């Protein structure tokens, strides 16, 4: 077990960026976070669309504009299904948002550590 932990540690340390590529890493991090923000936007739109559909269906029912008699038996189950689908989409969005927030924090710490390492290397070389 100790050997496996050591190999995981070595793999993680091998992937750490070096202070020499600080500017490139900062740009790469900004692009990654922008990509995740765009994906978060579309995740939120999916849940919002489900809630809007449910609201329209309920408004139709309240105004007495329910579908034909053959479709009435499926109206409430379908409304419930779309609502539950919206709840699951919203849950997916919230989980993904927490993952992106954690990623932002980790990347911020990594950038701060890289900046400190770069300044220390600059001082030692002077």
Image (cartoon, rainbow, N blue to C red):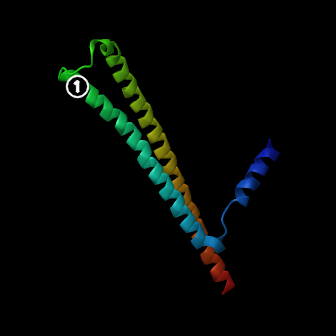
Q: Residue furthest left?
A: 63
Across and down, in percent, residue 75 comes to 32, 18
The residue under label 1 is: 60
Q: Horizontally, is 114 left or right of 50 in the view? A: right
Badge 1 density bin: few <14, some 14–19, many ≥20, Cα 10 Å: few
Q: Quarter of the image holding residue 68?
A: top left
Q: Look at 42% across and 29% down and name the residue there.
A: 85
The correct choice, above or below, for 84 with respect to 118 in the image is above
Across and down, in percent, residue 125 comes to 68, 84
SS for callout 1: helix
Across and down, in percent, residue 89 comes to 44, 35
- Residue 51 seen in the current view: yes
Q: Quarter of the image holding residue 21?
A: bottom right
Q: Horizontally, is 11 left or right of 53 in the view? A: right
Q: Quarter of the image holding residue 86?
A: top left
Q: Horizontally, is 92 left or right of 74 in the view? A: right
Across and down, in percent, residue 105 comes to 51, 55
């Amino acid at each position: 077990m100790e050997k496996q932990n050591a190999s995981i540690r070595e793999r993680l340390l091998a992937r750490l960026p070096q202070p020499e590529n600080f500017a490139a890493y900062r740009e790469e991090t900004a692009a990654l976070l922008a990509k995740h923000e765009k994906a978060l936007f579309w995740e939120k739109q999916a849940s919002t669309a489900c809630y809007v559909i449910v609201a329209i269906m309920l408004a139709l029912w309240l105004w007495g504009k329910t579908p034909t008699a053959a479709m009435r038996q499926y109206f409430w189950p379908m409304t419930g299904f779309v609502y539950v689908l919206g709840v699951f989409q919203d849950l997916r969005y919230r989980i993904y948002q927490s993952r992106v927030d954690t990623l932002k924090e980790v990347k911020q710490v990594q950038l701060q550590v890289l900046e400190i390492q770069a300044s220390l290397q600059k001082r030692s070389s002077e």
